Image (tube, rainbow, N blue to C red):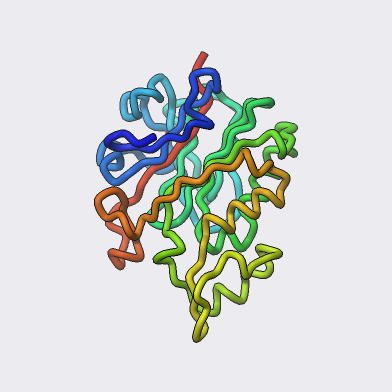
Amino acid sequence: MTSDSVITVPAFASARSGVRHFFGTRRHAARLAYEVGAPAPAQELEGAARSSWMLSVKQVHGTDALVVDRALTSSDRFSGGWDALVTDQRGIMVAVRTADCVPVLMHDPKRKIVAAVHAGWRGAVAGIVEKTISVMESRFGTVPEHVQVSIGPSAGVCCYEVDQTVLDKLPEACADSHRVVRGQRGGKAHLDLKLLIREQARSAGVRPDSITTVNLCTICHEDLFFSYRREGKVIGTMVSAIGLAPL
């Protein structure tokens, strides 16, 4: 489902899910202004997410996850770098910022845990999706087959060309790595980063029918998304977030 500024998915969108979420667009990004590493006040969020804090942290293209297992205050700051955020706290929206990388939102409806993941090719190859699910399992008792995963807008296989450096690393990340590349020639190929993440989620134990994908390419759709590849520099980022609704 697409509004004038955000995209939502049916798996998380029902009132009964107890989850608030969105994949942001460049229009939505203009409405948000908050300090990295600090919770954002409720009035800066979309209407569906009011009465929540939104937490974003410095992203470093790694695989570490920040676990938030207590209530936040306006004085909280999180120094350091993480590319995944996990919480069991109601009223906290965990957020990631992207401009071609993949925003991945996760929800365990049984244990009531949510996670937001920033997955570029480095994070994906290093297993950030599996590692985040493992954190949910070890810290909160999540059973992977109960997890719902939604893969958001990112650079699509239509446009995302990578070189041999990336291609050489893919077998470490995916048993059937040939399935996630197209048109390999002369040390270059197009990478289907969304499919790679889907396959990794399945390998981690997530059921195939619990994985949804927003099949929009950030490079193709200049009207909707910022794109580092298209623009040659970061002129803006989209914000995507998920959280348990306040009681």
Horizontal relation, residue 231 to residue 97: left or right: left
Residue 228 is drawn in which quadrant?
Answer: bottom left
Which one is nearer the viewer's eye here, 35 or 90?
A: 90
Residue at coordinates 31% horizontally, 34% vertically from top-left? Answer: 3
Query: Most extreme residue toward the bottom, as rendered?
Result: 186
- Whole-percent x and y of residue 188? 49, 79
Question: Is the residue 180 above or below the residue 242 in the image?
Answer: below
Query: Most extreme residue toward the top, as rendered?
Result: 247
Residue at coordinates 52% horizontally, 13% vertically from top-left? Answer: 247
- Whole-percent x and y of residue 236? 30, 52
Horizontal relation, residue 65 to residue 81: left or right: right
- Looking at the rendered image, the quarter that the N terminus falls into is top left
Which one is nearer the viewer's eye here, 215 or 92?
A: 215
Residue at coordinates 40% horizontally, 51% vertically from top-left? Answer: 216
Horizontal relation, residue 93 to residue 65: left or right: left
Horizontal relation, residue 132 to residue 97: left or right: right
- Whole-percent x and y of residue 33? 30, 38
Residue at coordinates 71% horizontally, 32% vertically from top-left? Answer: 140
Which one is nearer the viewer's eye here, 66 or 219?
A: 219
- Whole-percent x and y of residue 40? 38, 31
